[in-house]
Amino acid sequence: MEQTAISTHPHRIVDLVALKEKGAEVTCHTSFEVIPVDFDHRDSPFQAHVFMCYFSGKVNDTEYTFRKCYARGCSHNLCPHVSQAVMIANRYLQRDYRLLKQAGIEVEERLFSLEDMLVKFDGYQEQHDPTLTIDDYIHLAKEGIEVVVKIEPEYVPAVEYFGNYKNAQTFLTVNFHITSLGKTHDFQRCFACYPTDKEEEERERQNRVANARLQELYKEFDQALIKYEKKFFA
């Protein structure tokens, strides 16, 4: 699982970077959508809002498009509150912008907006932990603080709701249970997804995408000396 294949039809940020480094002309544009999604999660179905960014452009003369989930937010304790999720999504998005710009790929640095989101959720109180990301724990580990991570990949069936239609989608989600400084926090990150009715055609390809993204994260874990066991989608 060490190899990371470079697709001529990019599905990831690192694909765009690698193609640019090989001399390809790469353009990149973004658009955003915050999608209501019903997750059929084990015995606890719940609704959340998924923060999705669509990347599109051209590699030389070939058009491409792919989407990436940056966070999900809801009004209960099965995922971060939406006000936290928008900050988490923007932190990960800004990291991807830095990768693109370092490679010489110009992209307008637009971000997700909290506008009109909080009005959909009542009862939020400022009693939540600080908004942390997995990157924060990587930095702690690099400073010599012990970080232990338990990793659980899973396929989560869901239904996305758009303006005039709904779409059954399967999310390749990883649950990270991170213990450090005497506390354990749970994080969920989506590494890929596919239309549920196209599972036969799409599952294997999206497994490769998700596992390649996981491998990049594991490299960072290794460099920071984080304690964990590698797990992948099968």
Image (spheres, helix red, strand yellow):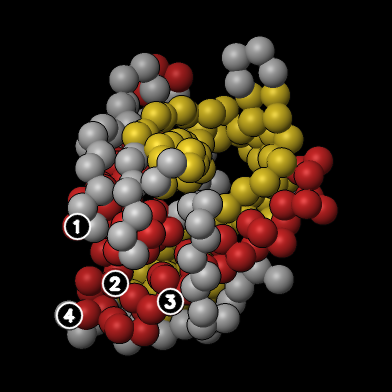
Q: Position of residue 42 (x, y in %)?
A: 73, 52
Q: Can you tell which quarter of the image residue 110 is in?
A: top left
CA distance separating discs 3 and 4: 18 Å
Task: Indicate which label's residue lies in the foreground, 3 or 4.
Answer: 3
Q: Earlier in the sequence, mark 4 or mark 1?
A: 1
Tell me the amino acid under the disc marked 4: Glu
Q: Residues within 10 Å of mark 4 (few under 14, many from 20)?
A: few
CA distance separating discs 1 and 2: 21 Å
Task: Indicate which label's residue lies in the foreground, 3 or 1.
Answer: 1
Of residue 207 and residue 229, the one placed in the foreground of this image is 207
Instruction: Tell me the tag on residue 143.
Output: 4
Q: Earlier in the sequence, mark 2 or mark 3?
A: 2
Tell me the amino acid under the disc marked 1: Gln
For disc 3, the marked residue is 218
Q: How many marks?
A: 4
CA distance separating discs 3 and 1: 22 Å
Instruction: Tell me the tag on residue 138.
Output: 2
